[in-house]
Image (spheres, grey):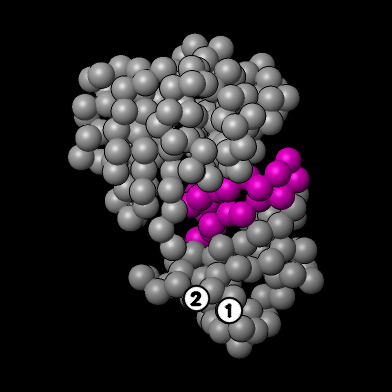
Amino acid sequence: MKKQFIVIGLGRFGSTICKELHHLGHEVLAIDSNKENVAKMSKHASHVIVANAIDEETLKSIGIRNFDHAIVAIGDNIQPSILCTLILKEMGIKKVWVKAHNAQHHKVLEKVGADRIINPEYEMGIRIANQLDSDKIIDYIELSNEYSIIELVATNKVSEKTIRELDIRDRYGCTLLGIKHDTDLNLSPSSDDTVYQDDVLIVMGKNQDLKKFEEKGL
């Protein structure tokens, strides 16, 4: 379903989001105070505007209220990011996602009502660290402080065993969401499906349970 997005701030992070959303077929309004940044996005957005994103009257004049989703990716100066987020929420934008630069910035964004706060460096650092921690882990997504989703490579230990035989839920308290076999993805596998060496298991659970499964189950 086609959606309408505003992307404010067209540095590396914002421009990447803008390009991908546009590529996925959504309508994207790209805004930045820097003319060069805006010019670079002219072919990767539905509309591009050079504007001051902390000027409420300017935002009103370009029809910001017609959009349900906004991504605030303003540069290293956190004050404009906070002010822009506050203005967008006061104008009734339903979903405002904001890039945070540090923990203090994150706390302030929570106070002013950001719907989701993104910490790219922190989140990527967590994922990379977990991949480095184990040769079995291909990817890692943190859902909360307690729960995560990980992708694990199946070893010879579990090869040619069915999901019923592995009994991942009862033994380790984890949920098997899917199995990747070569280019095929089996979502919600049945108890009779078989795991083979080098398959990728997509597993969700508490962090300590996932660690137990990784160390003892594979």
Q: CA distance from mark 1 to mark 2?
A: 6 Å
Specify the label residue 189 is tagged with. Answer: 1
147 magenta-colored = yes
Q: Is residue 216 visible?
A: no
Q: Is residue 190 visible?
A: yes
> In which quadrant is the C terminus drawn?
bottom right
Which of the two residues, 85 or 184, is positioned nearer the viewer here? 85
Which of the two residues, 62 or 122, is positioned nearer the viewer here? 62
Relative to 173, is 100 above or below?
above
| Pointer 1 with pointer 2, Cβ within 8 A | yes
> What residue type is disc 1 on?
Pro
Residues in magenta, as a range = 133-157
Secondary element at image label 2:
strand
Secondary element at image label 1:
loop
Q: Residue at x 68, y 20 (%)?
A: 108
Q: Badge 2 is on which residue?
A: 186
> What residue type is disc 2 on?
Asn
Which of the two residues, 18 or 100, is positioned nearer the viewer here? 18
> Residue 27: x, y in percent?
36, 48
> Residue 92: x, y in percent?
62, 37
- Left or right, 11 with respect to 120, comes to left
Q: Residue at x 59, y 32 (%)?
A: 91
> Residue 150: x, y in percent?
58, 54
Q: Residues within 10 Å of mark 2 (few under 14, many from 20)?
A: some
Specify the label residue 124 is tagged with. Answer: none
Q: Residue at x 36, y 70 (%)?
A: 183
